[in-house]
Amino acid sequence: MKVEIIAIGDELTSGRILNTTSAFAARNLFDAGYEIYAMHTIGDSPSLIGEALKRAIARVDAIVVTGGLGSTDDDLTNEAVSRALNRPTMPNLEILSNIRAHLDEITNAPVGELEKLAWLPKGAQALSPESRMAGYQLIHEDKPIFFLPGVPSQMKVLMVDHVLPTLATWHKDHHLTTYQKIFRIFNLPEAEVNRRIATVDLDPDVHIGYYPVFPEVHLSLTVRDKQTNNARRLFKSACKAINTVLGDSIYGHDRDSMERIVGRLLIKNDLNLAVAESCTGGLISKKLTDTPGSSAYFLGGIISYANSLKSCYLEVPDSLLENVGAVSREVAETMAVTVRTGSSADIGLSVTGIAGPDGGTEEKPVGTVYIGIATEEENWVTKFRFSGNRRQIRTLTAQSGLDLVRKYLLQQDLEEETA
Amino acid sequence: MKVEIIAIGDELTSGRILNTTSAFAARNLFDAGYEIYAMHTIGDSPSLIGEALKRAIARVDAIVVTGGLGSTDDDLTNEAVSRALNRPTMPNLEILSNIRAHLDEITNAPVGELEKLAWLPKGAQALSPESRMAGYQLIHEDKPIFFLPGVPSQMKVLMVDHVLPTLATWHKDHHLTTYQKIFRIFNLPEAEVNRRIATVDLDPDVHIGYYPVFPEVHLSLTVRDKQTNNARRLFKSACKAINTVLGDSIYGHDRDSMERIVGRLLIKNDLNLAVAESCTGGLISKKLTDTPGSSAYFLGGIISYANSLKSCYLEVPDSLLENVGAVSREVAETMAVTVRTGSSADIGLSVTGIAGPDGGTEEKPVGTVYIGIATEEENWVTKFRFSGNRRQIRTLTAQSGLDLVRKYLLQQDLEEETA
């Protein structure tokens, strides 16, 4: 079953807003076994919207349209649909009364321009009439077309709660069995990943894709087949081969993130972590606390962006800062040790480096980073020389710090197993 | 002059990777005065690529294509272009010798599959032969078509250094004068922005767009005219009207960010800032240090994610944590005051709250946040009750904290002016 995705809005074609809804729709549709024929982004122009819609109806089996459903003057999707598909707009009374009820709660104002939200093309079936942005579905030439709001949070709810279930019962027999896994790789260049995979003798029905997603490389493994058993067999053996050649450079799969993996390993080992961040300025802590439940293994720490904070909170002696400088093995080690002891954490992680664009010297160019780890048994510091711009160096530093913690925890696991 | 943008890659149509290159191209082309006719995303399928390309050639004046230029098996753009436009591929000797030279530096290996990078459709002119991903330009039916790599960092360099300058000299007379400004608004709902703007009597040639970009609302003002003077006059008077009705809810313009604006105001007032973050877990510090040069006004601070860190680094008495809880006015104030004094900063900013999804109570539901500010003259705490998911609550908290600092600094400015 082929699906086309159309995103509407001048804010997208002018590049002011990044189109995230189309990617969300594509990922969910792809995961559910549909083929994405194409994705389009067009401005708030009724003639272009109509043209794209008619072309899609002529060649695919279902269409998802996002954007242009709001109440402001530049929301033109309904008008365009009405004209292109020859379906006059008419008010949806359920939506209208919900708007009225909602307004009554906060004001006595007339419905005014909000009424526009309720005028839908003839035959439209509201997906979620109780929401302010109801969204709707239209069956045209026996093909389902879904119209969803452009605001990502609203769009995503309707996509998951309405579009996917509706499609799932639409053309059951057209489904292919799809097995897919993304291998998330860090600290191994794409060319090396490629070279190692080339040494594996994979079945021609196994499809491998490479995607550099800074600072990682993602490798996708896809097997699609009408025969479930055959697909599963091919998929399992390919997974095993990939794991063998890439080893612990694979830090996770699918929607894993480095910080979640580190969190999972900390919980498994019943350990907690504190950080002392200089050049990353909070990025590592921010990443760790993005995850709900991170308080189970992350205590917090010190952002010692200024040298004065390295002295007052992390006991880095002024003499050390003067003699070897803030970006040094010695300071990284002191930071890791003092944040660990000061916060009574099991593991202390520290980073100090030069993220640029300024601050580099011949001896310590931009990208020079020291990462320290302090544990009950031992402390060690690793030196890196990253290249890239400020954002890239900070991202590489944060990811490398977490990766060092990951590898330490994996080692603990191994030692426990062999003990 | 109309431009169409085509992005190629299975990683995009499956939604695994967010397409950021198309938005980058669109923004830059739009800013330069071109009209974006449409943007398409299609998979690694030569027939679809060819079809999209031929359709675009038939209806627009220039085309930007990204992706599918690499050396792996799933990079099929050149093959598709060759077939669709009937231009056999031939090796570009300059690119080939650069690959050879580059390889010689690191290995004696044969060129191997990298050779694929040098085989371009007949008539192709490499944009940057010295780069590994050279990109190329093709003039077909008197229309320029640019083929750029899909990796955002590589694509962006070629876009800015080659595509825009080439287009600028291509059809000079087709340019419209475009004046555009984005007003970045925080802490004012879209409906209220809309209502206030509706009270202004704007010229019909002035185009206003509203874009909720969580947690902000962006308002775009666009005036396009062949007559430069007329456009400038309309633009200036509309800017003034918008500033008048929206006031200090406009925190910045165009590509400003809240953290940059706060940084600029801190520099202007010769003040520095330290933070104590609980529920935001480093997000505020991360945002502040994203900006190069932030060490001029940001010292760092404490991530007191665990209560134990509030005690050991921020002198929050255990009795206070027991009696009123970590999420309280008293703890927020103590955190702001102690991080300010402990780090010898001019301003201390603290946040403590419940980001969820767990941890809420009837009395203090998820979204309850206290933000404290400590200065030499006074300390105060503001209470918020945000709604949304964990990510949204953290984002709103960070943005609100920075916005409070911004408003304090604006007030300082005013007092200085009236003094």
Image: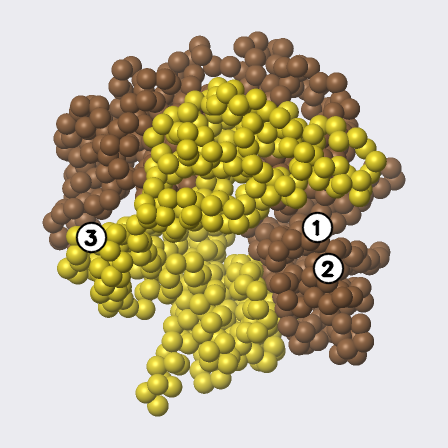
Chain colours: A brown, B yellow
Query: Is B344 in front, or is A369?
Result: A369
Tell me: B189 left or right of A274.
left
Looking at the picture, does residue A60 appear above or below residue A272?
Answer: above
> Label 1 to label 3, Cα distance in Å?
52 Å
Residue that label 3 marks: B205
Number of labels in the image equals 3
Q: Percent x, y for residue A114?
A: 18, 45
Q: Residue at x 33, y 58 (%)?
A: B181
Which chain's residue wears label 2? A
Location of the N terminus of chain A (image quadrant): top left
Find numbered disc 3 in the image and state the secondary structure of the residue it sits on.
loop
Query: Is A49 in front, or is A176?
Result: A49
Q: Percent x, y for residue B115?
A: 69, 30
Q: Answer few, some or many: residues within 10 Å of disc 1's Cα (few below 14, many 20 plus, some between 14 and 19).
A: many
Asked if disc 2 and disc 3 are in contact, CB closer than 8 Å, the reply is no
Location of the C terminus of chain A (image quadrant): top right
Q: Are marks 2 and 1 on the same chain?
A: yes
Residue that label 2 marks: A369
Q: Answer few, some or many: residues within 10 Å of disc 3's Cα (few below 14, many 20 plus, some between 14 and 19).
A: few
